Image: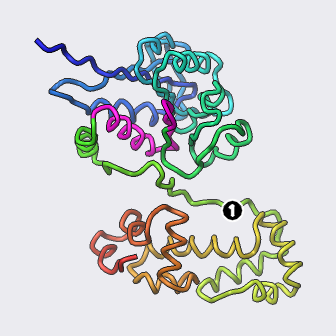
Amino acid sequence: MPRKRTPHRVVVVAPSPVSMFNLAIPELMFGKVEVDGRPGYEVVICAAEPGPVPTSGGLDLHVRHGLEAIEEADTVMVAGTGEPYLPDPRIVAAVKAAAADGKRISSLCTGAFQLAEAGLLEGRRATTYWAHAEEMRRRYPRVDLQGDVLYVQDGPYVTASGYAAGIDLCLHIIRTDYGAAVANEVARRALVAPVRPGGQTQFTHTPLPPERGHACADTRGWAMRNLDKPLTLTDLARHAGVSVRTLTRRFHAESGVSPLQWLLHQRVERAKELLESTTLPMDQVARGCGLGTADSLRAHVVRRTGLTPSAYRAQFSRLGTEDAVGSSNAA
């Protein structure tokens, strides 16, 4: 008789205070895998101290297993925590030992900080939730941080950004272990897209640095009201009543970016708003945000989001499906 397949063992580490959503993702996704009528995975949750583990939502979860569960793991997955800048030395040591044993190591959201603290990500590509990307770069400069992607695999290390990107990471692992057909069936059962490439951006509202002054506030407000016009640096300086050089210096001091960088950022944000909330053809969206042409709109939206304007509209439209699709030109 053929030997029974042993389920692939995924041990999820719960740092305190752990993200409940992060813990739910592997249980839900891996739990839907069946191969030849048998479970493809066994999921075990462990913590540095078995028993009640605080969550970032204010509840306590009872975790039965300690970190010794990692010894029997095929894959170790470190969940995110509400205190990402305080890696638990016990978890760091356990993950480092697991890596030395040749286990696949992964993280969700801010769990990447535990891997970085263990030195596992030095010289490797990795990601984390975008809101914590700059802090990771500051703390771990030798990590090749990919701050705007959904997930990254570099050798045996797989890291995901925040929230639903953990679903994409789990599907990537399932595809790697059991193939696309199994992963697609899991995605169908979970009612999620079967493939979002890891390099797809995190679809964040990319924030500008906080403004630190008000000398250019009137000019910024005026520019926002006139984004559909072909504004130039000279136009902005003329409105502010100063030279181009003075405007540039003041603008950078207050906003952290140059006037034209700020203006382009606002144009793309306006384009995204129009794509989400209207059915305007792409050439009208381009004119409405000041990007000029549909080709220019496409180039900037793809650079910012990883999606074409029509694909962005299809995924993020706040209108009904028929309305959203109706007038999407090829773009």
Q: Quadrant of residue 321?
A: bottom left
Residue 69 falls left or right of residue 300: left
What is the three-letter code of the residue carrying label 1?
Leu
Residue 107 percent coordinates (x, y): 51, 33
Please state which of residues 198 and 187 is positioned toward the viewer in this rendering.
Answer: 198
Q: Magenta segment: does it hold 45?
A: no
Q: Magenta segment: does it hold 173?
A: yes
Quadrant into which the C terminus falls: bottom left
Q: Quadrant of residue 5?
A: top left
Residue at image point 49% right, 12% down: 66
Residue 242 falls left or right of residue 211: right
- The residue pinned by badge 1 equals 208
Residue at image point 47% right, 18% down: 46
Q: Which residues are magenta?
A: 154-178
Residue at image point 54% right, 17% down: 100
Residue 42 percent coordinates (x, y): 32, 21
User: From what the image shows, is residue 269 above or below residue 280?
Assistant: above
